[in-house]
Structure formats: C-alpha cells, structure tokens
Image (spheres, rainbow, N blue to C red):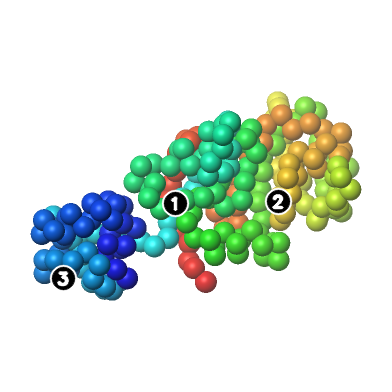
Amino acid sequence: MRLDKMLANSGVGSRKDIKNMVKSGIVTVNGQIVKKSDIHINENTDKVCVNGAPVEYCEFVYLMLNKPAGYVSATEDFKYPTVIDLVPEQYRHYDLFPVGRLDIDTEGLLILTNDGAYAHNVLSPKKHVYKTYYAELDVPATEDDVNAFANGITIEGGYTCKEAELTLLDGETPSALVRICEGKFHQVKLMFKAVGKTVTYLKRIKFGEFELPDDLPLGEFTEIYIKRE
C-alpha cells in the first residue's frame, strides 16, 4: 500500500497534508525518515510514525450506535439529520454507512461500518440474521398473537412473514419482544397492525451476535470487533 494512502485512511490528514508532512521530515518508516509520500509499505508490518507517534493502520471499522429517534439511517438526507451526523470526529474519514436501517422514530442498535462485504453478508436473506425488538403497544398483545406470529403472519400488501417469536412482557405499559430474521419496511409495526395493535415505541436491542449495552446512552457509539470471513 502507498504510504500516503495508509496515512490518509488512518485519519492523519489529506493527501496534500501528508505530502507536506513528508517534505518536512516528520514521517518515518521503520525509524528512517522518508522523502516521498507515494512509496509502498507493508501496512501490517512496517512501523510508521508521524512526529515520533506511531500510526496504527485499520482498514475496517465497526461501530455500534444506540440510535435516537429523529435520525434517518442513511449517509445523507435533505430533510432530516442522519446517523452519520452522530459519528465522532475520529471516525469521519472512514466513510461509514449504516448496516440496514431503523425507522426515523425507532431507537436502538444500529451498526455502522465501511466494510461492504460484511454488510452484504449480514443483510442477505439467506443468512437468517435475527434481530430482536422491544415494542410498546396501545393495547396488550395476547397468546393468539404469539401463535399468529409463530405461524407466519400476513401483513399489509399481502406479504407473509417468516415465523417470528413474540414474547409477552409484564408491566404497566403493554409491551413485548419480537424476534425476526427479516427486515421488511416497517415490518414489526405492520405485524402488530395485522393483529389489531399499534406500536407506540420501538427499540432494537439485538442484531445477530450483538446486544445493545444497557449503559450505552442514546446517540453514543461503542467500537465492536467483527471477525471477517
């Protein structure tokens, strides 16, 4: 990999900035001052420093966001703020994008990454990646609803969902957990609508192997590790 590309991908600066840094003699590779920014290095084994500080190269980044309501799951939008607007400054140069989507009024677990292969893999219908949602309703769900979800409920538009797991919760507010392996537009809301209930609040708490930490505030991120196949 070219040195300037490695440094740019690591957030050190723009290609122009890096060229000037090299000219000023503050960039070293394996202890030797380099004179050209376009030299090729091994980003995994060569030790690169700027002003004596080591630069660790990381090709892919995976962040878990506790998405707040009011943000769209997109990289840009002309009407509403996006989840990218919440990304901390130190990750901005990675060109992150959301893996899948949550509705603008839905909160909870959303993964952002720059790894297109990972996103394609987990969003593929063939992979059956399960997601769990906490839903508050206008009226309590019933055991009949549990059976209907398990048998594959038909939603508005005529689509029959794959079998889903509905768990009824106790509490003052009618609520339930829904576990599905699909991601149709407004699917959880439409599933409840099909059995005569309205979702008043929705939060995703699990996505595949990941579970939303109780101590992760709305709008905040935590970096997660994903083993690439």
Going from N to C along the chain, the mark reached first, 3 or 2, is 3
Question: Looking at the image, which is closer to me, 7 or 161?
Answer: 7
Question: Residue at the location (64% across, 33% down)?
Answer: 105
Question: Residue at the location (86% across, 52% down)?
Answer: 160
Distance Cα–Cα, label 1 vs label 2: 24 Å
Q: Secondary structure at mark 2?
A: loop
Identified by mark 3, the residue type is Asn
Distance Cα–Cα, label 1 vs label 3: 29 Å
Image height of 63 relative to 70, above or below: below
Q: Which mark is residue 183?
A: 2
Identified by mark 2, the residue type is Gly
Q: What residue is pinned by disc 3?
A: 30
Q: What residue is pinned by disc 1?
A: 95
Going from N to C along the chain, the mark reached first, 1 or 3, is 3
Which is in the foreground here, disc 1 or disc 2?
1
Residue 81 image position (x, y, % from top left):
53, 33
Q: Secondary structure at mark 3?
A: loop
In this rendering, position of residue 196 left or right of residue 12: right
Residue 190 image position (x, y, % from top left):
80, 40
